[in-house]
Amino acid sequence: MIQTVERSPNFDSLIDHPSTFGVIVDLMGPYLQIMGTVIYVRYPSGDMPFGWHTDGGASLREFRVAPDSRPLNFKIQYFLTDIPADNRANFCFVPGSHRRDFPEEGFAKGAWPEGGVQLVAEAGDAVIFTYGLWHGVAPNEGEDVRRSLTFRYGQLWSRPWDYEKAPPDVLARMTPRQRRLMGDIGPNSAPGAYYAPEDQLDIILDGIERPPT
């Protein structure tokens, strides 16, 4: 289910939650936006819902930034239910795979790449992962439904997934920083203002310790 913030205002606080947003800005830098949001609901099933993949399709996986560069985009996934053991619709990934070529033929549904692991988590935990990480979802062999929520953050110049700017009724209930992250860059009209609004640092870094200049 996409465009999560339209579904309920209860998710708004996760846009820039104080427990995670400082880390997000430290990784991405202050010129960032939310590119997309998704709610995942995984019902009991003996099969993986889809094969291993990277985010952004075949084109994006060909881009690898240097280790000391800002990332192009990444996701943060919040787990809304406990995942106490393997094969409970766990988030699966191959550590270090974002630095390797994804197989051209991909992986058959249900296949398991060498080094793949399943993440055990509690409700309220969060994980950040880059677009190039090989990842998937384990079968849900338990009796409980697994729910989670992702926010994809990207550089301000990138094309967003959900919408260029959130609907007015959604923006109206948000804080200035949440509005900015959801595409409202204000009345800037100068060429290039979209990439670096004049008040970007003041809005994004409000309440966050600023890095040394």
Image (cartoon, helix red, strand yellow):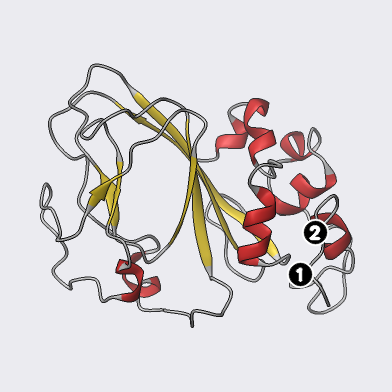
Q: Nearer the viewer, residue 9 or 83?
A: 83
Tag 1 near tag 2, CB within 8 Å: yes
Q: Position of residue 53 (x, y in %)?
A: 27, 58
Residue named by callout 2: 185
Helix, strand or loop status at disc 2: loop
Q: Residue at x 61, y 33 (%)?
A: 6
Q: Nearer the viewer, residue 33 or 124?
A: 124
Q: Position of residue 181 (x, y in %)?
A: 71, 52
What's under tag 1, amino acid-wise? Tyr
Dot label at residue 205: none
Q: Residues within 10 Å of mark 2 (few under 14, many from 20)?
A: many
Q: Position of residue 194 (x, y in %)?
A: 76, 69
Q: Residue at x 55, y 40 (%)?
A: 3
- The answer to whether residue 155 is seen in the rendering is no
Q: Earlier in the sequence, mark 1 or mark 2?
A: 2
Q: Is residue 54 left or right of residue 173?
A: left
Q: Position of residue 139 (x, y in %)?
A: 19, 35
